[in-house]
Image: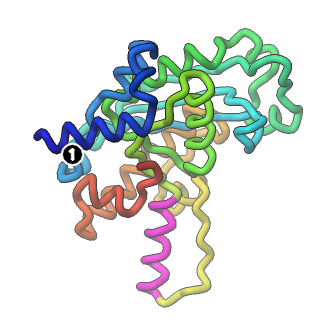
Amino acid sequence: MRSLVRWWRSVVARLVDPRRLEDLPVVVQDYLNAPVPAGRLPWRDVPYTVLDIETSGLDPRWDSILAIGAVDIEGGRVRLDRRWYSMTRPPEPSKVAAASIRIHGLLRQELAQAPPLEPVLLELLSRLQGRVLVVHMAAIDVKFLDRALRKHFRVRLRGPALDTARIGGVLLHNERMMSGDDERPRDTTLRSLAKQAKIPVHPQHNALSDALTTAQLFLYQATRLQKQGKDTFHKLLRVGGCLK
């Protein structure tokens, strides 16, 4: 037990300067100090929060988070009563481009009335405490969230986290190896993987709808991996972990 405590303290030390920890909002402190689920647990016994964000572009250095959607998974089931969605007002003087609006449908007038990013991040962190983050295409969502947390609180987004795109790529690769069809395209977009799994695709480019689709896809993927002997949380991380 003592070795586990020492290990967790070392994780927190890498996420934030310990001298600043007590100066952070209580929600941020609780997020950083919450213990992570044990790797030996069956994957269904681990609490997950599935997340999707909509942004004004693809570069976290210049573009803004415009909306966040999340839904919890507990006991291997999607908890619709634990879904959450919030738009967020982009900082001045940034302006959401018309091309971006055509994709996500978030109008400038709506965004102007939304709360700023910092309180939205605090609400998100309160929902992530002690839970495993699940995203699709971590290269986008994780980078945006990590940069936002560093900017507002000087802390890092903590793991562990799972990427359904990465898991989907592994499953597709295994299928290609089994069938001998090396020419089969490996499309790991959310829509493509959901259609292959015969999962209903909720309206795209809405943060909450995409989070719901991702949650259903994750349950499908985890169930398939369980049938292949990958039945623990640690084994899931070895396949689709995206944030240590």
Name the residue at 50% across, 45% down: 135
Q: Is residue 178 magenta?
A: yes
Q: Nearer the viewer, residue 66 or 161?
A: 161
Q: Is residue 152 magenta?
A: no
Q: Position of residue 224 (x, y in %)?
A: 33, 63
The image shows a total of numbered marks equal to 1
Q: From the viewer's perspective, is 192 left or right of 89?
A: left
> What SS does tag 1 mark?
loop
Query: Around disc 1, counting alpha carbons within 10 Å, would you say few (fewer than 14), some (14 to 19), or many (20 or more)?
Result: few
| Quarter of the figure with the N terminus | top left
Q: Position of residue 101 (x, y in %)?
A: 81, 32
Give the residue at the far bottom of this rendering. 180
Name the residue at 56% across, 86% down: 182
Name the residue at 28% across, 60% down: 235
- Looking at the picture, does residue 61 appear above or below residue 112? below
Question: Which residue is denoted by mark 1 in the rendering?
Answer: 38
Q: Amino acid at mark 1?
A: Ala
Name the residue at 55% across, 58% down: 195
- Looking at the picture, does residue 28 appear above or below residue 187? above
Magenta-colored span: 166-179
Q: Position of residue 219 (x, y in %)?
A: 36, 50
Q: Main secondary structure of the magenta part?
A: helix
